[in-house]
Image (cartoon, rainbow, N blue to C red):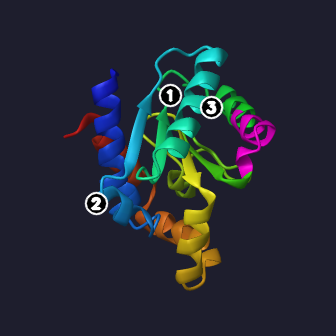
Amino acid sequence: MNEAQAIEATQRWLEWLVIGQNLCPFAHKEFARKRIHYAYQADHSDDAYYDSLILEVKRLIEQPEISTSLLIWPNAKDFEGFLSLIGMAEQVLQSHGWHHHFQLAHFHPEYCFADTSEDDPSNYTNRSPVPMLHLLRVDQVARVLEKYPHPESIPERNIRHTLAMGKEKLEQLLVTCKKGK
């Protein structure tokens, strides 16, 4: 998947699954305002992942009009290896003191929560057409959560919703996001 295809698949996923199924009640506003930056890194070396993360943090620091950034890493296909990259990314934020300003969410086509089976529909809350990190501004997240009634209920609501939808429907929706048909 080339850069344009990966970004388009990510945008469809945001629109059709994340926003369309209301998995993140905060995503619509920034998506509609086009305040999401999509960064693509095809090189799958640790140095390339490290450099792309540093670049995106600096972009968010220098460009406050960008609300959030999605770091699309299409070649981080192995889920266990991807989890190692998450650890590296958390360590980078911590070591630079950026963890006070930015936080990470992560998504992967094979995402599987530790306490679920691989085919559990609830995994689709974090499954995406391509592997990616979501770099969020801590202060924005805090402001949004202050205004949302019972934000702690979002994960449970999402689990109930994905279980009600079922694995087959979610899988088809994810495939459609990836292929664009």
Q: Is residue 71 magenta?
A: no
Q: Which mark is residue 73?
A: 1
Badge 3 is on which residue?
79
* Residue at x 52% of width, y 67% of height: 158
For the residues bearing labels 2 and 3, Cβ distance under 8 angstroms:
no
Inter-mark Cα distance, 2 to 3: 30 Å
Say what amino acid the circle numbered 1 marks.
Answer: Trp
Instruction: Determine the residue located farthest toward the left in the rendered image.
Output: 181
Q: Nearer the viewer, mark 1 or mark 2?
A: 2
Q: Quadrant of residue 38?
A: top left
Instruction: Determine the residue located farthest toward the front in the rendered image.
Output: 62
Query: Where residue 57 appears, x then y in whole percent?
Result: 58, 39
Inter-mark Cα distance, 1 to 3: 12 Å
Q: Is residue 121 visible?
A: yes
- Is the residue marked by circle 2 packed among few (<14), some (14-19), or many (20+) residues within 10 Å? few
Q: Quadrant of residue 8?
A: top left
Q: Is residue 94 magenta?
A: yes
Badge 2 is on which residue?
32
Please tell me which of labels 1 and 3 falls first in the chain.
1
Please tell me which of labels 2 and 3 falls first in the chain.
2
Instruction: Determine the residue located farthest toward the bottom in the rendered image.
Output: 149
Query: Where residue 108 appears, x then y in whole percent?
Result: 53, 39
Q: Quadrant of the N terminus?
A: top left
Q: Nearer the viewer, mark 2 or mark 3?
A: 2
Task: Tell me the chief SS of the magenta region.
Answer: helix
Residue situated in front as seen by the camera: 97 or 9: 97
Report the span colored magenta.
89-99
* Residue at x 56% of width, y 52% of height: 136
